[in-house]
Image (cartoon, grey):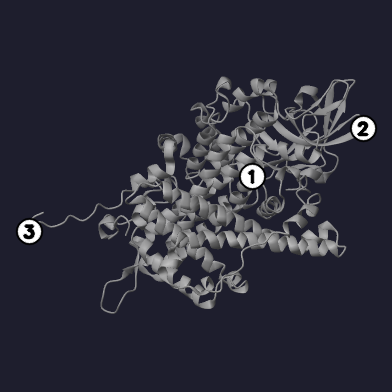
Amino acid sequence: MRDDETTSPPPLFDPSVLLRHLEGRHVDLRSQVLEAMAKPELAIPRPIEPERYREEVLKAVGHLAERGWGAMAYPPELGGGGDTAAAVKIFETLAYGDLSVVVKFGVQFGLFGGSVLQLGSDLHRKTHLSEIGTLELPGCFAMTERDHGSNVRDIRTRATYDSSAQTFEIHTPDPGAVKDWIGNAALHGKMATVFARLHTQGADQGVHAFLVPLRNERGRTLEGVEIRDRGDKVGLNGVDNGTIRFTRVRVPRSALLDRFAQVAPDGTYESSIPDPGRRFFTMLGTLVSGRISIAAASVSASKTSLATALRYGSRRTQFGPAGEPEIPLLDYRAHQRLLLPRLAATYGLHFAVWKVVDDLTRNGASPSSEIEVRAAALKAYASRHAVETIQSCREACGGEGYSAINRFGELRDDVDIFTTFEGANPVLLQLVAKGLLTEYRDQMGDLRFWGVVQQMVRLTGSRIQQANPIASRRTEEAHLRDVSFHAEMFQLREKRLTHSLALRLRERISNGMNAFHAVNECQDHLLTLGEAHAERLVLDAFHEGVARAPTPGVSEVLGELARLHALSTLERHAGWYLEHGVMEGGKTKAIRALVNRLCGEVREKVPFLVDAFGIPDDVLAAPAGIGERGAVSFPRDWRRRSSARPGA
């Protein structure tokens, strides 16, 4: 190089490279879904009357079905795509838009169709999946009851077998057993997968699933079926939730979804899974893909809100040094602290969700117990993260965030229920803790821990790492940035919480307390352990995503995000680490200072990290009709203003 030559600056980070890394083999499918979302039939205007909203959502789901996307997870021989991961990608991408469409799509093709796919026989699948996938047969997933909610094991709807007629009588015995909050029920569902207690030959065989017709071809409810509209809700008002009551409705013996259990013509009950508890959890396996999908949709909602808030924070100026221009909101430390750790966590959750999707796909039709636990953990963690992120983004945009065009209110209202359905988060986190407390997940048969407490005793004999007095006070930056340090801290917290929970339960039971009260006294501990497990899953997946990323450029920037996520999480739990002697005060202060510096470093990459979400502007803004202004956007020169460089 000649002395008079100047060195060209390295190229700016290319968001499209990161987008391809995030989306993998589904990048083209994702583009197709986004293109479809821009078409008039999927762009439902606001405001809109609830009655019309529901009909427009039904039409939108019909358009998606016409493209074959509803049947994407079904076997090819039955008109499907045979690709579970692609089905999740479609759901995740649709979640950038109208969430009523997403939820109705999920109820029809994921829950209703998924129950036939996972719980039915070949005859059920051949008879119904094709018409479910085309929306010719709209359906419901009728599990939840008014008095039981997440407690599926104790639902009271009965399915009594009559051998003389070879029929099941589906009956709601009392008002508390009414099926409640059932999506697709109030208006459109013609059939439901109904979870009921199977009674045959005088014995209660536990909860099983049945296909029960609800309406005739003219849309009128059938004899013995009473359906009521749940009316307006906090959000998702494009979904027709309803209640269903059955009064001695007769269905044929073939209505039993009998993949795992059969009733012979004479009423004899048989099952390939003799243990009732294991059989129950196997039947609930149909919920696993639904929980993963809700986690994916939660991440999409977080990305949507962050994209708008971070664009606004880069454009909107406020105050500044005396006599000098105002500076962008995102240059303020408080603004960075509010949004950038959430941006980092959202990236980590993306990798965690897709790691479990890939593992589920490799595992086949029957998810492993370990995947069930991971799905429960990530659904709870991602949905809570989405709710908190949307609210933070709304606040970060000030009054502009209160404008309906920017969608924060709609997102907040629609996503709020994600913390409740597909399993309420506190219940799921206890399920996670239970999975961690048992050596063999297939031995557990009760969500409430009745059958597994004795196995906890064996866990108390394990020895976990003791705090290193030297490591607890190390504050040099190289150590604090070390990803192996982050991984060790997350793992240590999870192990110690598991160990101490087992000790607490053993102590109570040894002193004569029954299992129910012992678990109830330690319930806060169970929830904390479940969250700690979810946090460790996210960090591990984040590190794997960084390791696989293209370099130079993408891997370095993702590495910065992963460090920000890890250290901001450690900062949030500083009290726990101090209490347990794992860190000293000087170390937690050093972590807090480093989080500040990392926020400053990541701030320079914000335009590229947000562009890598790949959410089109017309999707970020609310559909036409809600207002005159467009969604907040980045300034035209925002990339030029950034001094970000690969690996900076």
The reply, left or right, for residue 576 in relation to residue 440 is left
Nearer the observer: mark 1 or 2; the answer is 1
Q: Are marks 3 and 2 in contact (CB under 8 Å)?
A: no
| Distance CA(mark 3)–CA(mark 2) | 96 Å
- Residue 563 sits in which quadrant? bottom left
**Residue placed under numbered mark 2 in the picture:** 202
> Looking at the picture, how far across and down is residue 370, in whole percent?
64, 44
Name the residue located 52 percent from the left edge and 52 percent from the top edge.
540
Of residues 221 and 142, which is closer to you in this image?
Answer: 142
Tell me the quadrant of the picture where the C terminus can be found.
bottom left
Q: Residues within 10 Å of mark 2 (few under 14, many from 20)?
A: few
Give the SS element for disc 1. helix
Residue 553 in view here: yes
The reply, left or right, for residue 140 in relation to residue 392 is right
| Distance CA(mark 1)–CA(mark 2) | 36 Å
| Distance CA(mark 1)–CA(mark 3) | 62 Å
Q: Which mark is residue 170?
A: none
The reply, left or right, for residue 383 in relation to residue 432 is left
Q: Which mark is residue 4?
A: 3
> Looking at the picture, how far across and down is residue 616, in whole percent?
38, 45
Name the residue located 75 percent from the left edge and 55 percent from the top edge.
458
Name the residue located 35 percent from the left edge and 61 percent from the top edge.
314
Q: Amino acid at mark 3?
A: Asp
**Residue placed under numbered mark 1 in the picture:** 370
Tell me the quadrant of the picture where the N terminus can be found.
bottom left
> Looking at the picture, how far across and down is residue 363, in whole percent?
59, 35
Of residues 378 and 554, which is closer to you in this image?
Answer: 554
